[in-house]
Image (cartoon, rainbow, N blue to C red):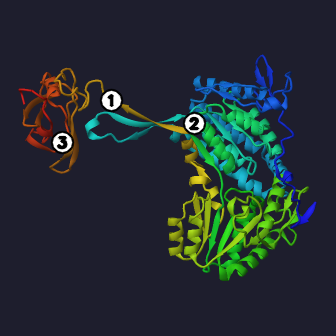
Amino acid sequence: DTHTHTHTKNNTHYLPRHDTAPPPFHMERAGVLSRHVAWGWGSAAADGGTATSASSRHLPLRVGACGAVAAHSDEERAVAEAHGRLSSAFRAGLSFEVRWRRRQLRALQHLLSEHRNELVAAVCHDLGKQHSHEVFVSEINVVTVEVEHALEHLSRWVQPESVSTPLFLQPSKSYVFKDPLGVTLIISPWNYPLNLALVPLIGSIAAGNCTFLKLSRHSKATSKALHQLLERYLDPRGLVVESEGGASMIQALTALKWNHIFFTGSCSVGRIVYERAAKFLTPVTLELGGKNPCVIDGSVDMELTCKRVAWGKFFNAGQTCIGVDYVIVPHHLEGAFIEGMRRAIEGFYGANPRDSESFPRIISEYHVQRLAKLLDDGEVVFGGEYNVKEKYFAPTIMRAPKEGSLLIQDEIFGPILLVKCVSNVEEALEYIEERPHPLATYVFTNHTSIQSKCIQRIRCGSIVVNDCLIHFANHNLPFGGVGESGLGSYHGDGTFNTFTHRKSVMMSSTRSTYSGQCPRGDGSADGHLLHFTLAGFLPPPPLFFFFLSVFHIDHKLIWITFNHVLALVFGPTMFADSTRRVARCAHEVSPVFGYKVVGRGKSGQPSMVVAAFSCRPFPGDTNQ
C-alpha cells in the first residue's frame, strides 16, 4: 500500500463510497427519536421503527410553494418534523429572551471547559493527530474566545441602535432593531469539526435563532462526541443536531425553507446549496475555499519566509481552506525557495514526516487517492510518498504543472505545495487576477509599494502580509470569501450580524403629520396637520441649537401666502385654528431656504421667527 509516484489508475478507487447508508430515523408517538435527533435532555434510544430500503432513501422530494415537503422516507419525515418543531419553538418566543440566549452560551462554555480533553482526543482520532497542540490552537482556543466575546457583548448587541432623523421628519425618532432571523441551518465540514460547527452556532444562539446543526459524518469521533454533549448541555427545544447523514440528508435539509443557511465546505457542494436555497429566496452564508496564492519577492528573509509558508501550508496536513495552495516566486529565487522549504519541513517534521508526532493524517483513504492522482500533473521535487491504508501523505513540493491539469484548476486541499515562477510582481498579479477570487492571499515583501499594490489589486477574502493563517484567530476581523471563495462573513460581532435582521423602526407623534402627506390637486387637505421643523444657530454666544415646529397646537401661527412662497410666523401665544389652514396651503413643501428672527423677549430668546418655504399652490386656489 505504500506508493511513490506509482498509484492505481482505476478510477473507481477515487469515487466516494456510498455503500453504507446512514441508519433511518425512528418514530414513536411522542415524536421523532433517534441517534440523529433527540427532543429530550440527553441521548435518546432508537425505539421501534423499520428499516428503509436504499431506493426509498434517495427518492426525490416534492417541494411545495411554501416549503412543504412530501417525504418518502423516515429520514425525510424526521427532517421535516425537526424543522416543524424548531419553527414552533421560535414562534412561541423560546429564543427571544436574552436570558435564554445567555444561558445557552454559558452552557456551551461549560461544555468546552468540562469536556475539553474528550473533544481534543476525538479530533486527534479523526485527523490522525498524535500531538494535541494544533487542536488547542485551531479548535478549542478559537471557540472559547468566540463564546466569551459573545457573552461579554451580548447586552450591547441586542440593544436597538438610535440613528439620526432628518429635520423635516422630527420630532420622530429612528431606531434599528436586531431581530433574529428565525430557524437557521448550519452545515459544518470535517477539517475543523469543532471550530467550524460551534462558532456559527454561537452567533445563531446569540442572535436568538433556533438552529439545526448538521455535523460532518466524515469526522465520526468528533461528531459523535459533540452531538452527545450538545444534547446534554443545550436546550433541545431550540437546537437539533444531526451527525450521521450523508448526501441524502443534505438533500432533505435543503428541500425545506429555512430563514438562513450557513454552509462551510467545497465550492461544488456550495453551489448546490445556494441553488436549492434560491427556490425559497433563503439568504445564505457560504464559507468555501479556493486556490490561495502566496507571492514572494527578493526583499525578504528567505529562511524565515519558508518557515512561515511551511507552517501555513502543512498545518493540519494542508486540509485548511485558508492554507497556502501555491507559491509565486521570481525565476532566480526558485532554487533558493525550494531548498529553504526542504530545510523548514525537515526542521518541523524530521527526515521522515511519517514518524513525526506533529504531522497529522488525511481524513480518508479516498482523499489520499485523490491527492495521489495530482502527482502526475507536474514535477515532484520533494516528498511525494503516501500510504493509503495509513491515510498518510508526505509534505510534497511540485513545480512545472501541466497546463489544464487539476493541479492548476482545483483547490489542492492537502500537503502538496505548487511552485510557479514569474518574471516580476506585475506578472504575478496578472496571473492571480485572471483566476477566481481566492479566500486568502499571502504576500511576503518588505517593499511598502508592493504591499499596497497587492492589497489594492487582488480581490480576495483577506490578505496577510509577511505571515500565514494568523488573521483567522483575530475575531475583530471579518472572515469570509468573495466570488467563488464564498458569500458573507463572520467572526466576533460579524457572526451575530450574520444571523440577525436589522429592522428599521420609526416612532412618530399622533399630534401632527409630515409635509407631503396631504392629497394633491383637489384642495381637500383639511384635517391634515403639517409638521415643519426649523433648526439653526442664533447669537449671541454661546451658540445654541434650537427647534421650532408646528407640533404643539398651542403655538401661535400666522400664515401668509404669496406667489409660490409660504411664509410662516411662529409666536408664543395661542392661535390653534390656523394649524389646520396651513395644511391646505402647503402643497409640496421643499426644505427651508431662509429664516429670520423678528424680535426677542427680555430673556434674549427669540419671540418670533419668520421662515420661508418654497411651495406650489393648489390649482384653481383663489387665495394664492
Depth check: give the residue in front, 475 or 537. Answer: 475
Depth check: give the residue in front, 99 or 623. Answer: 623
Q: In 3D space, how far apart are the residues under numbered discs 3 and 1 (Cα atoms)?
A: 21 Å
User: Amino acid under label 3?
Assistant: Val
**Residue at the image position 13 percent from the left and 39 percent from the top:** 611
Q: Which residue is mark 3?
A: 592
**Residue at the image position 78 percent from the left and 16 percent from the top:** 29
2 horizontally vs 314: left or right: right
Q: Closer to the N terminus: mark 3 or mark 2?
A: 2
Q: Which numbered tag is attached to residue 508?
A: 1
Q: In 3D space, how far apart are the residues under numbered discs 3 and 2 (Cα atoms)?
A: 44 Å
Q: The residue tagged with tag 3: helix, strand or loop? A: loop
User: In the rendered view, would you say 78 is above or below 264?
Assistant: above
**Residue at the image position 28 percent from the left and 36 percent from the top:** 169
Of the 4 image quadrants, the one containing the C terminus is top left
Q: The residue tagged with tag 2: helix, strand or loop? A: loop
